[in-house]
Amino acid sequence: MKLELKGVSYIYDPLASKVKKAVDDVSLTIEKGQFVGLVGHTGSGKSTLAQLLNGLVKPTAGQVLLDGQDVHAKGFPLKTLRQRVGLVFQYPEYQLFEENVLKDVCFGPKNLGLPRAEQIEKAKKALRLVGMEENLYDNSPFDLSGGERRRAAIAGVLAMEPDILVLDEPTAGLDPAGRDEILSQIARLCKEEGIGVVLISHSMEDVAAYTERMLVMDHGKLCFDDAPREVFRHVEELESMGLSAPQVTYIVRKLNERGFALPDDLLTVEEAKDAILKAIMK
């Protein structure tokens, strides 16, 4: 499964006296099994880009293609796109509403017109994928912890069996343990289930630790599309966009200024620790 944007632009108010493109001539391809990080300062266009991927908004110019088909062409079933490209908004647990967790996760398959038995089968599979304990299925969503509610909400989208999952700040508001748990589950979905993931995040540490590809938006433009290790070499350019590199990057720079000779592309604490120990042992 391949999702493409070809020369896509989007203008919120084309009749305004001063037209501003929320997304400006962006081309990219996302496939199943990829774990992609999408970053940018507030107003950079990343959330609009996510909505374009899911078909929630129609591009002002350019095309959105699903396996080569224009999703906005006459006769194309947008329902198919939204099933295959799942979008999880920030704080998705605010959309939980059913009397128990299982019924809530069944809501998507029910809307697809599936038989009750199949709804339950898909819902239970999705709940297992996010690591939800079976003894919680009959609980009210509002009796769950913050991390459990977040996982239940993500399961509601996974029950539609998407090929690509777009997550807008899925760890917002969670404590460090809850954040790590959610991201680990998402990484496992990508690796073991082959689901493509687009992770929108403000945390450079999370993008560095989990994603294999990084998209950087600035004023509607796609400025970088590369492996995180390569993107984070451009610290000054990122800072000019109101972004930063992982804290490890700055620590390594300071140590190198003091005489160390550490690689300049270290991204995680574990990588930095190993490199520092190796340098000291020489």
Image (cartoon, helix red, strand yellow):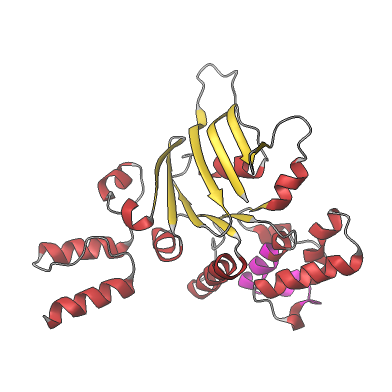
Q: Along the line of sight, which residue is nearer the eye, 97 or 5? A: 5
Regarding residue 100, the answer to whether it shows in the image is no
Q: Residue furthest left?
A: 259
Q: Position of residue 239 (x, y in %)?
A: 30, 46
Q: Is residue 145 left or right of residue 27?
A: right
Tell me how many marks there are: 0
Q: Along the line of sight, which residue is nearer the eye, 266 or 149? A: 266
Does residue 56 belong to the magenta stretch?
Answer: no
| 54 to 59, vertically: above or below | below
Regarding residue 18, the answer to whether it shows in the image is yes
Classify the position of the C terminus by image quarter. Answer: bottom left
Q: Position of residue 62 (x, y in %)?
A: 57, 29
Q: Is residue 113 left or right of residue 79?
A: right
Q: Is residue 249 left or right of residue 282?
A: right
In terms of secondary structure, what is the magenta stretch mainly?
Answer: helix
Q: Along the line of sight, which residue is nearer the eye, 223 or 245? A: 223
Q: Residue at x 70, y 68 (%)?
A: 152
Q: Position of residue 7 (x, y in %)?
A: 52, 31
Q: Position of residue 281 (x, y in %)?
A: 14, 83
Q: Residue at x 67, y 40 (%)?
A: 55
| 145 to 30, vertically: above or below | below
Q: Residue at x 65, y 56 (%)?
A: 163
Q: Along the line of sight, which residue is nearer the eye, 198 or 93? A: 198
Q: Residue at x 56, y 52 (%)?
A: 31
| 83 to 48, vertically: above or below | below
Quadrant of res 259: bottom left
Residue range (magenta): 137-154
Does residue 138 belong to the magenta stretch?
Answer: yes
